[in-house]
């Protein structure tokens, strides 16, 4: 029997980074936090990866509706280079429409939310997609 793997997912943006966690045993991704990009984001990501004992860091990979790279794709790729020393294993997962779907889901709850809630939920959706495809 294989051992459980622990995951941290990141929805990387220029202002905020949504964070979600999950593990292969339960296979449910959970919104965890939102990190402001203020120069200390790598320190915070490192702390979360260590705290969660993450085996894999999953980074949302943005593309346009045609599946082509965008300016945001380049930003995420460049940012992710800094994660190589932090993440035991780093993988990309398509993040198409996750922020839109996250906001729609939050709206359906009919409760107040902030932008950071969208980012954290989008990270959870990215991680959920990754875990389901890795089954």
Image (cartoon, helix red, strand yellow):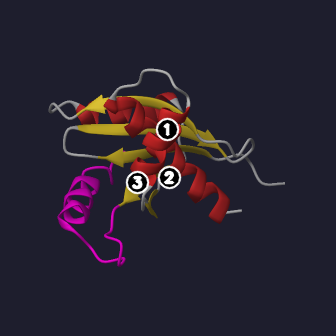
Q: Which residue is labeled 2 in the image?
A: 126
| Disc 2 to disc 3: CB gap under 8 Å | no
Q: CA distance from mark 2 to mark 1?
A: 9 Å
The image's mark for residue 59 is 3
Image coordinates for residue 72, horizontal then vertical, percent: 22, 60
Label 3 Cα neighbours within 10 Å, binned few <14 / some 14-19 / many ≥20: many
Which of the two discs, 2 and 1, labels the residue nearer the N terminus? 1
Let me know if residue 59 appears in the view. yes
Q: Secondary structure at mark 3?
A: strand
Residue at the spot 35% in from the left edge and 31% down from the top edge: 116
Q: Is residue 13 left or right of residue 106?
A: left
| Disc 1 to disc 3: CB gap under 8 Å | no
Q: Which residue is labeled 1 in the image?
A: 20
From which residue to which does the magenta span run? 62-88
Q: Nearer the viewer, residue 132 or 39?
A: 132
Where 108 sits versus 104, above or below? above
Image coordinates for residue 34, horizontal then vertical, percent: 36, 30
Residue 28 picture quarter: top right
Residue at the spot 42% in from the left edge and 58% down from the top edge: 97
Q: Nearer the viewer, residue 68 or 101?
A: 101
Does residue 76 belong to the magenta stretch? yes
């Amino acid at each position: 029997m294989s051992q459980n793997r622990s995951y941290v997912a990141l929805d990387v943006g220029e202002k905020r980074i949504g964070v979600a966690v999950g593990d292969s045993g339960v296979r449910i991704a959970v919104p965890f936090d939102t990190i402001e990009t203020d120069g200390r984001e790598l320190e915070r990501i490192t702390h979360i990866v260590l705290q969660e004992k993450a085996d894999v860091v999953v980074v949302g990979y943005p593309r346009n509706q045609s599946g082509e790279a965008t300016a945001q794709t380049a930003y995420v790729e460049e940012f992710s280079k800094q994660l190589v020393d932090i993440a035991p294993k780093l993988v990309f997962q398509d993040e198409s429409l996750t922020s839109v779907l996250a906001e729609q889901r939050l709206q359906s709850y009919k409760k107040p939310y902030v932008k950071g809630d969208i980012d954290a939920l989008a990270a959870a959706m990215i991680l959920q997609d990754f875990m389901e495809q890795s089954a």
